[in-house]
Every structure is written in C-alpha cells, then in structure tokens.
Image (tube, helix red, strand yellow):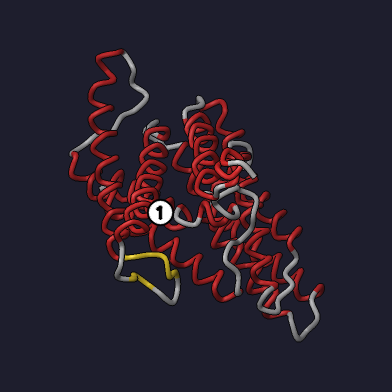
Amino acid sequence: MNSSSQCILNPEMKRVLTALVLIPLALFLVFLGPKWDGLFTLIIALVAMLAAWEYLGLATQRGANPPRLTVALAILLLFGSRIFADIFDVLRQTDVVFGLLALALLVFCTFRSPVERMMADASASVFCLLYIGLTLLTLPALKQDPEGNGASLLTFLFCVVWAGDIAAFYVGRTWGRRKLAPTLSPNKTWLGAIASVAGSVLVTYGLLALSAELPTLNVTRLVYPGESWYWYTMAVVLNIAAQVGDLAESALKRSAGVKDSGSLLPGHGGVLDRIDALLLAAPVLWYAQIVRQRF
C-alpha cells in the first residue's frame, strides 16, 4: 500500500474530512431564513432519530430490547409538534406532548415486551425520548428565538462546543498526562479539559469581535447583545456542560461494553458520539436565554 493510501485511511484524516463537511453544512442550516425553520426542525429530528437508534442499540447490549422504530416515531412526533404548533395551540406545550409520548411508550412496551423484560424496555425507551429527543428539541427552539437572534445563538453554541472539543482532543492527546475520569473515558486529561475551556473562551472572543465588525459591512446576521461578560460566562458554562455530556455518553458506552455508538461518521464513530456534548449544552443555553429574557 502506498503512502497516499495510508493517508486517506488514517483515522485522524477521516476525522478532519468529516468535520470539514459537517461544520459548513450545520452553519448553512443555521443561517437559513425563518421560512426554513420547518426544514431545520426536520433535519434535527432525523439526527435525533439516528442517535436514538444507536442509543437503543447500546441498551440491547445490557439485555433490553426496546422498540426502536416506535421510539424513533415518538421522537419524530415530538419534533412534529414543534412544526405544527402554529396550527394546534396545545402543541406549544412541550411538556404535555412529551408526557403523552412517554406514556404511550410505556403502554406499548407493556403489551409488546415479555413481562420479565418490560421494565428494561420501557425504561430505555422513555429515557431515550428524554435524553435525545427532548434535549435536541431545544435546537429548533433556540433557532426560533423570540428576539430573532436564533442564528447567532446556534452559531455561538456550535462554535463553543466545537472549539472546546478540538482543543481538548489535540492538546490533551499531545501533552495531557493526568487522567480526568479514567473509568469513564481513559483518553481525557485534566490538561485537555482546561484547554477545552480556553478554546471555547477564545472562539467567543472571535465571535464577539466579528459581530462588532460586521455592521460596518452592512451585515447584521451575527449579533450578541448585552455585556460581553455574559457571553464569556456562558462559554465556560456551556463548555463544562458539553464535557459532562461527553463523559455521560462515554459512561453509557462503557456500560454497554462498546467503544463507539456506531460507525456512520468516519473518524467520529456514530451520530450519538458526535452530538453527545450538545445533549447537555443545548438545553443549558436554552434555559439560560429564558432566564436572561425574563430577568
């Protein structure tokens, strides 16, 4: 095999190339106008369904056999409620929709699963709806920010998480020695975690500087109102949430005895491996914005 073939098959090269495709695509979807919000929600729903499929695959490694198609349908209905909320006012009450779908999964497992496995199947199904469906639902909620700043919020969220992940990966792998949580993720180090926070703060500085310069070019698509300390604080908080989310998913995989949740994304593992940080970071930003807008 020649050197060029080895380079193409190198896992790190696959990781970089996958990122070069996914990052511009994600930002393109973020900056689509409001009339495309339905499409954005559907794409996030598809991502959630793929991640849920992988998570339920992990559950099967621990003796459960949850109904994957039914859970995927429940997640699709959860996101569909967001799309049709303007038509049916009751669908605006996400907690009501989530509760009904969770109960429906419980009833389905009651009659579908063998009695000795019913608890495991129902628990995995309902938790999946919460862990992946409800958390990712905050992404379209952020995009539809009532102040019209959704694209900026999602750009901030993605860049903070991505920059932190990149800094942790390369700094931790190169210089990290002291393990952060060896029983959960043996490759993560304290130096990598610190570098991750620094990376998130640094990219926040860049976003704030860029948003200040763009109006001089008559571009107002990137706006971060208020004091800069708020955004730097949120960068640190979101980074910590993202790292905890990453560790939580690592714990789930270790419990199931697997290294990756899947193999759909070259160099990154599965979809769940790629979005694990967002599963905590996105709800944290959403709740922070609610608090900020009300107080």
The residue type indicated by label 1 comes to Ala
Question: Which sits in the foreground, 290 or 58?
Answer: 58
Outermost residue, bottom side: 116
User: What is the x, y in percent for residue 184?
Assistant: 45, 73
Query: SS for tag 1?
Result: helix
User: On the picture, is 108 further left or further right than 245?
Assistant: right
Relative to 58, residue 79 above or below: above
User: On the picture, is 69 further left or further right than 150?
Assistant: right
Q: Tell me what residue is drawn at x 60 percent, y 51 percent.
A: 48
Q: Kindly tell me whether residue 81 is visible in this rendering.
A: no
Outermost residue, front side: 2
Question: Which sits in the foreground, 159 or 107?
Answer: 159
Relative to 18, residue 211 above or below: above
Q: Tell me what residue is drawn at x 29 percent, y 20 percent.
A: 214
Q: Tell me what residue is drawn at x 26 percent, y 58 percent.
A: 194
Q: Residues within 10 Å of mark 1 (few under 14, many from 20)?
A: many
Q: Badge 1 is on which residue?
A: 281
Relative to 39, residue 290 above or below: below
User: On the picture, is 153 further left or further right than 85?
Assistant: left
Q: Name which quarter of the figure residue 66 lies in.
A: bottom right
User: What is the x, y in percent for residue 270?
Assistant: 60, 54
Q: Name which quarter of the figure residue 245 lies in.
A: bottom left
How many numbered circles does the render carry? 1
User: What is the x, y in percent for residue 100?
Assistant: 64, 61
Q: Kindly tell me whether residue 202 is visible in this rendering.
A: yes
User: What is the x, y in percent for residue 85?
Assistant: 59, 41
Question: Which sits in the foreground, 216 or 226?
Answer: 216
- Quarter of the picture containing the N terminus is top right
Q: Tell me what residue is drawn at x 32 percent, y 59 percent.
A: 192
Relative to 52, residue 47 above or below: above
